[in-house]
Amino acid sequence: MIALYHCVSARSFRPLWMLEELGAPYELRMLPFPPRVRERSYLEINPLGTIPYLIDGDTRMTESAAMCQYLAERFDPDNLRGLAVRPGEPGFGAWLNWLHHGEATLTFPQTIVLRYGRFEPDERKLPQAADDYAKWFIARLRGIDAVLAQHEFLSAERFTAADISVGYALMLAGQLDLVARFPTNVAAYWQRLQQREGFRRGLAAQRDAALAQGVSPHDAGID
Ligand SMILES: N[C@@H](CCC(=O)N[C@@H](CS)C(=O)NCC(=O)O)C(=O)O
């Protein structure tokens, strides 16, 4: 069975949401945030100390967007649920683009906001960096806003793993109080994504696993 190491509402929510959309079996192993500091033994499992970490037989993965692609192939090789977009489909390039955009372009600036706006001790906080990268993140939403002005989802006219990748970046923005600054189409899209059963099951799964495993079920303020 897949084992997924997870902290509440961390990037590991991407593969968790994916597993729920696929209806795949998995074991959720909860860690306090940040595990590198609060669960030192985790470094023996994942030398990076980061979340997510996915184990499937001999497979070991540390990248949340890649995990979404992997899980689609692993549990739905015929793509019956449509969470992947295949090379022969017109939306293939767009799918890969937005799948990676969610992490590489949208989540990255938010980690600077978190670190230099919240996590560092006061003497190391950098309000200007936090404000500038919050603006940087909001400005980068223009790309998906333009697509969402014409389409319900980001690629192939259906909900896919790309929406999970970008959707998680929007979820993280909620922890940073940035949702009120979303452009109109992004705001409506984020409302739609939160209605999905798979998203809601992911939230319930992390809360239940956190309570069962003695970890706080509240958002840790993730970096
Ligand atoms: N690119 C990786 C980033 C993984 C990552 O940096 N995760 C954060 C949590 S969301 C983390 O583990 N931070 C704690 C640390 O760096 O110690 C991914 O998409 O999974």
Image (tube, rainbow, N blue to C red):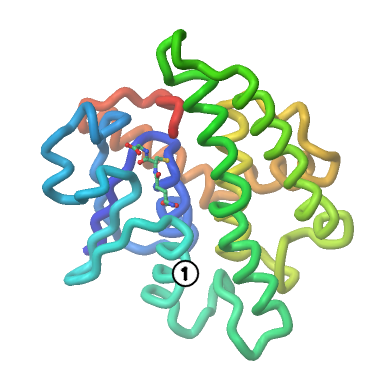
In the image, is 45 to the left or to the right of 33? left
What residue lies at 80% left-to-right and 48% top-to-bottom?
A: 142
What residue lies at 60% left-to-right and 86% top-to-bottom?
A: 87
Quick check: 96 above or below 37? below
Q: In the picture, which quadrant includes the N terminus?
A: bottom left
In the orientation shown, which residue stands out farthest toward the top?
122
Q: Amino acid at mark 1?
A: Gln
Quick check: 9 above or below 117? below
What residue lies at 73% left-to-right and 60% top-to-bottom?
A: 153
- Reading the image, the residue beneath label 1 is 69
Q: SS of the residue at dot 1?
A: helix
Image x and y of residue 34, in percent: 31, 31
Quick check: 221 above or below 188? above
What residue lies at 55% left-to-right and 44% top-to-bottom?
A: 108
Count the numbered circles shown: 1
Q: In the picture, which quadrant includes the C terminus?
A: top left
Q: In which of the image's four quarters is ligand 1 placed? A: top left
Q: Nearer the viewer, residue 49 or 58?
A: 49
Disc 1 crowd, CA 10 A, few/some/many (<14, 14-19, 20+): many
Residue 81 image-quadrant placement: bottom right
Image x and y of residue 204, in percent: 42, 38
Ligand 1 is within 8 Å of the C-beta of the residue at disc 1: no
In the orientation shown, which residue stands out farthest toward the right?
150
In the orientation shown, which residue stands out farthest toward the bottom?
88
In the image, is 12 to the left or to the right of 213? right
Quick check: 64 above or below 74? above
In the image, is 28 to the left or to the right of 74? left
Q: Nearer the viewer, residue 28 or 9?
A: 9
Image x and y of residue 116, in percent: 51, 23
